[in-house]
């Protein structure tokens, strides 16, 4: 499998697991990242993802933690409490989800 495709698949799995609501692992619900959110742009709405991520984070008093460019276009951000809903109202933003630490068990079939 090509590296780019593997990164895309892994990113999509991790984000899907983090975005799942009500899904609890063996140890319970995923641990929330303090003041952390994943922001996903509408498809094709942003040309320069890193620049717009920085612009939005600064406008809402936050800081960019990571920029996603492969499985989706968006970024991870740390924001002051209550700012995520305001960020979600930006017309370029598709949705905002709380960031969480998830663990995946990988089983290799032979």
Image (tube, rainbow, N blue to C red):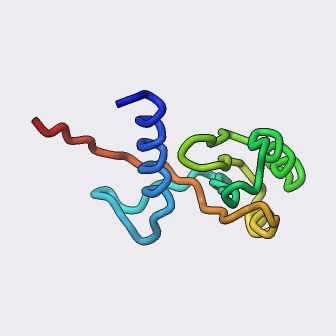
Q: Position of residue 55 (x, y in %)?
A: 86, 46
Task: Tell me where residue 29 sits by quadrant.
Answer: bottom left
Q: Nearer the viewer, residue 20 or 24?
A: 20
Q: Which residue is drawn at the image coordinates 81% and 49% (left, top)? A: 57
Task: Tell me where residue 66 sits by quadrant.
Answer: top right
Vertical side of 88 occupied by 72: above or below: above
Q: Position of residue 10 (x, y in %)?
A: 42, 42
Q: Which residue is drawn at the image coordinates 60% and 60% (left, top)? A: 98
Where's the C terminus, which quadrant?
Answer: top left
Report the side of 50 relative to 10 (left or right). Answer: right
In the displayed orientation, state which residue is furthest to the top: 3
Q: Which residue is drawn at the image coordinates 37% and 46% (left, top)? A: 103
Task: Tell me where residue 1 sits by quadrant.
Answer: top left
Report the side of 53 relative to 39 (left or right). Answer: right
Q: Nearer the viewer, residue 62 or 106?
A: 106
Q: Position of residue 35 (x, y in %)?
A: 68, 54
Q: Position of residue 46 (x, y in %)?
A: 77, 51
Q: Nearer the viewer, residue 57 or 8?
A: 8
In the displayed orientation, state which residue is furthest to the right: 59
Q: Which residue is drawn at the image coordinates 83% and 52% (left, top)? A: 56
Vertical side of 38 occupied by 47: above or below: above
Q: Tell how many labels.
A: 0
Report the side of 43 relative to 58 (left or right). Answer: left
């Amino acid at each position: 499998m090509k590296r780019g495709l593997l990164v895309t698949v892994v990113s999509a799995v991790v984000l899907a697991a983090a975005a799942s609501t009500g899904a609890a692992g063996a140890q319970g619900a995923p641990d929330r990242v303090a003041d952390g959110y994943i922001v996903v742009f509408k498809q094709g709405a942003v040309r320069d993802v890193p620049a717009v991520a920085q612009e939005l984070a600064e406008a809402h008093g936050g800081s960019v933690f990571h920029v996603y460019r492969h499985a989706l276009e968006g970024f991870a951000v740390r924001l002051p409490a209550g700012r995520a809903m305001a960020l979600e109202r930006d017309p370029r933003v598709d949705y905002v989800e709380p960031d969480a630490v998830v663990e995946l068990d990988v089983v290799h079939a032979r």
